[in-house]
Amino acid sequence: MVNSYIVTVLTKMSQKIAITGMGIISSIGNNVEENFISLQSGKHGISDIQMFETRHAGAIKTGEVKLSNEELIQKLQLDEDNNVTRTSLLGMVAAKEAIESAGISEINGYRTGLISSTSVGGMDITEKYFYSYENFPEKQKYIDAHDAGNSSLAIAGYLGLKGMVSTISTACSSAANAIMMGAKLIKNGVLDRVIVGGTDSLSKFTLNGFNTLMILTDSYNTPFDNDRKGLNLGEAAAFLVLESEEIVKKENKKVLAYLSGYGNANDAHHQTASSENGQGAFLAMQQALKISGLAKEDINYINVHGTATPNNDLSEGIAMIRIFGENQVPEFSSTKAFTGHTLAAAAGIEAVFSILAMQNGLIFPNLNFTTKMAEFDLTPVTELKKKDINHVLSNSFGFGGNCSTLIFSKS
């Protein structure tokens, strides 16, 4: 009995994690197809602020989804009397597409869970009504929608999901950790299928916070450029459907890609800055490669975190050189010049982009790059490039030193 149990556990731990569906909404498109068209054509979504009131409008550019909350509610066919926040609305759109993409008609047909992630939560609305709750009781319904977990429950409720629901908030690595947690739940036999990803809307709180940190650019972000000034914030949501090998075989399902590796590390260096030697990023990539069983030479493309801040790009570049060696770093690019930095959703949307890169044999360009950084000899791919891609490594690094790496494979 004991030996049989051990064999079962080891078999599950070694099984592949199939990705059978994906959905996305960002500043470059309201679904997967629209995002892919923008990535191919080099069309970015960075613009002046139009969707919410701020004193920074006209001075700071962001990656906005050009749909109002009312339009999103109508798109989702929700009752007008709701307390759903923008973060939840964006998440619902992406999660719905992911479920449909995976061909799931009965969401509770297997042990299914949702691991969502966010950093903003419902603060886009609670900050709006903060000073009027006492005088306008009808607005108090939004207080319950403020916390991060409420957005996950709202998405699960919209999907009709009755299984496990959890929320991860580790800043800009959140969605990567949600994806990683979903994979572990399947590998450990807890769940058969997990919807994983992240969602974040723009808000005054995050805009003012990042502006105070002095890491926002006054123009368009320029990842890995020597003269980079900082990031553009963005809003987005993206979800993947992870399924066990058993479901894939039983349902004869089409597999978009496999999650072959993942790693998380925390260098505990600083509240907001990455370490000078890229230790957290190095450890995360090292662990992801180890779990995948791949050699570093097997990686065909890196979707870098690439925020275009002076600290991040230098630290990430050093970490990549430490992993792959001088003059041996695989071709890489940051897609944040397309969408802006979407915080907790970033790893989710870049997971979708990584899978699209593999499916179509394309490396999407690192927009706005002109000058190589002085500290090392690394140049991102700056034009759309055709290439056979079997394995993509995707980095996502969060405040507090929380660094995560995912590896996506064709088979």
Image (cartoon, helix red, strand yellow):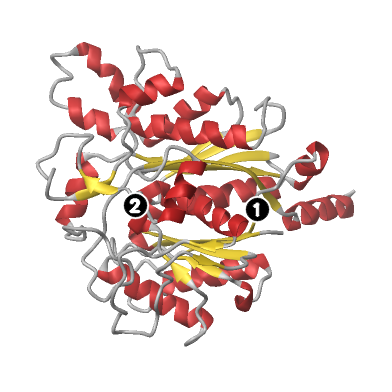
Looking at the picture, how far across and down is residue 158, in whole percent?
50, 23
Q: Amino acid at mark 1?
A: Ala
In the image, 8: left or right of 369?
Answer: right
User: Which of pointers 1 and 2 indicates the residue nearer the eye?
Assistant: 2
Confirm whether residue 152 shows in the render.
no
Dot 1 corresponds to which residue? 257
Q: Which residue is mark 2?
A: 44
Q: Is residue 335 visible?
A: yes
Q: Position of residue 292 (x, y in %)?
A: 65, 65
Pointer 1 local density, CA inside 10 Å: few below 14, some 14–19, many at least 20: many
Residue 284 lies, in percent from the top left, at 50, 67
- Name the outermost residue toward the front: 41
Which circle's residue, 1 or 2, is located before the other in the chain? 2
Q: Is residue 14 left or right of residue 178?
A: right
Residue 312: quadrant of the picture? bottom left
- The mark found on residue 1 in the picture is none
